[in-house]
Amino acid sequence: MKKLILLVIVLLSFGSIAYSQSISDNALGLRLGDSDGFGAEISYQRAFGDNNRGEFDLGWRTGNNFSGFKLAGLYQWVWQIDGGFNWYAGAGGGLGSYSFENGNNKDSNETFVFAAGDIGIEYDFDFPLLLSLDFRPEFGFGNFNDDLDFDIALGVRYQF
């Protein structure tokens, strides 16, 4: 009986590995959102295998008394939930530069680096459209951005 149970578990494991979904080779679009203001990012995803990919984002940020840009790179693992739904998680980092008003009517500039995590859900339509919603905690290293930032965004990408 133990051998039969072990055989069933092994066969189910191989079946779930064989059922893994292949992700699109390339996806290009926008990632809209931020934690403290509005931000837009040009987002590019490149598949590295059947279930992992890189995401590269170049974004602009605006908020109360600041504006700037941010470049991020993330490595992501993708798992199928059901049908076109996937969830993904990843890690990476990037750099940015902000210009802000410090209260004395003087502008200051700050360049910083950050480490980031990423978790999200996406829907892959039958036509080449990918919608996603993700949560990206970022820990910044610099005078202006030296804390934990929770970045939440909606992604709309064209797959090719």
Image: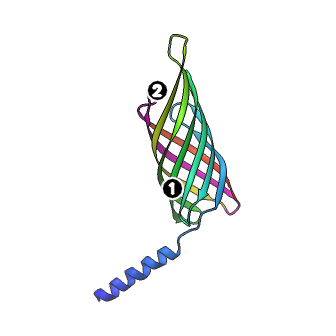
Circle 2 residue:
144
Q: What SS does tag 1 mark?
A: strand
- Count of numbered tags: 2
Task: Give percent across and percent down for residue 45.
Answer: 61, 53
Circle 1 residue:
76
| Residue in front for this viewpoint, 137 or 57 | 57
Task: Give percent across and percent down for residue 157.
Answer: 66, 51
* Amino acid type, label 2: Phe
Q: What SS does tag 2 mark?
A: loop
Is 147 covered by the magenta stretch? yes
The secondary structure making up most of the magenta span is: strand
Question: Does residue 125 appear anywhere in the picture?
Answer: yes
Is 149 covered by the magenta stretch? no
Task: Give percent across and percent down for residue 91.
Answer: 46, 50
Crowding near the residue tagged with mark 2, few <14, some 14–19, many ≥20 C-alpha atoms within 10 Å: some
> In which quadrant is the N terminus drawn?
bottom left
The magenta region covers 126-148
- Judging from the image, the colouring scheme is rainbow
- With respect to residue 137, does 103 lie above or below? above
